[in-house]
Image (tube, rainbow, N blue to C red):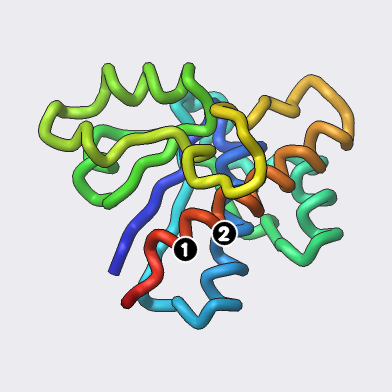
Amino acid sequence: MKRVLFVCTGNICRSPTAEGVARVLIARRGLDGLIEVDSAGTEGYHVGAAPDPRARKIALKRGYDLSSLRARKLEVPDFQRFDLVLAMDEGHLEIMERLCPQVYRPKIALFMRYARTHRRTDVPDPYYGGDAGFEAVLDYCEDGVEGLLDTLKPE
């Protein structure tokens, strides 16, 4: 079993979107039981909250139901538990590098390194914008998750 954790700031927009997309694409590829995904935030602002209503609305239009997900804060034991801990932007990566014990540093990376068609390092934060930002996040998450699953698929 491979375990992947997606990380953003408050765990209500970008990382739960990536988690929701990953859950659906894992099921579509018949990889249930082989890959486990979760998400967390570098900050604890929204612990226990559902994803942003805009993220849920946009995701649901494409067949991703985020309604059961709840925000949580990234914790040091996550670096041991997960095989990959993927940051949505460089700021998250810097925070993770400070928090992560040295032995687990090879597990952390930028999520967009797995993207196949979008050439960017960060998934931009849509929180202070409109629906178009959430649509873009979903585009990036679909691309990144597809590429990630291509690298994790069993031989």
Q: Do the residues under discs 2 and 1 have CB atoms within 8 angstroms?
A: yes
Q: CA distance from mark 2 to mark 1?
A: 6 Å
Could you say where residue 3 lies in the image, as x and y percent from the top left?
33, 58
Q: Is residue 46 above or below residue 59?
A: above
> Helix, strand, or loop for circle 1?
helix
Which mark, residue 95? none
Classify residue 74 by image quadrant: top left
Counting every numbered tag in the picture gives 2
Q: Locate residue 130 relative to residue 49 in the image: left or right.
A: right
Q: Residue drawn 45% across and 77% down?
A: 31
In the displayed image of the protein, which residue is found farthest to the bottom?
Answer: 30
Q: Residue drawn 16% across and 28% down?
A: 101
The residue singled out by tag 1 in the image is 150
Give the residue type at disc 1.
Answer: Asp
> Helix, strand, or loop for circle 2?
helix
The residue singled out by tag 2 in the image is 146
Give the camera-side residue of 3 and 142.
142
Give the camera-side residue of 147 and 61.
147
Q: Is residue 73 above or below residue 63?
A: above
Could you say where residue 32 lies in the image, as x and y percent from the top left?
45, 77
Could you say where residue 14 lies in the image, as x and y percent from the top left?
62, 38
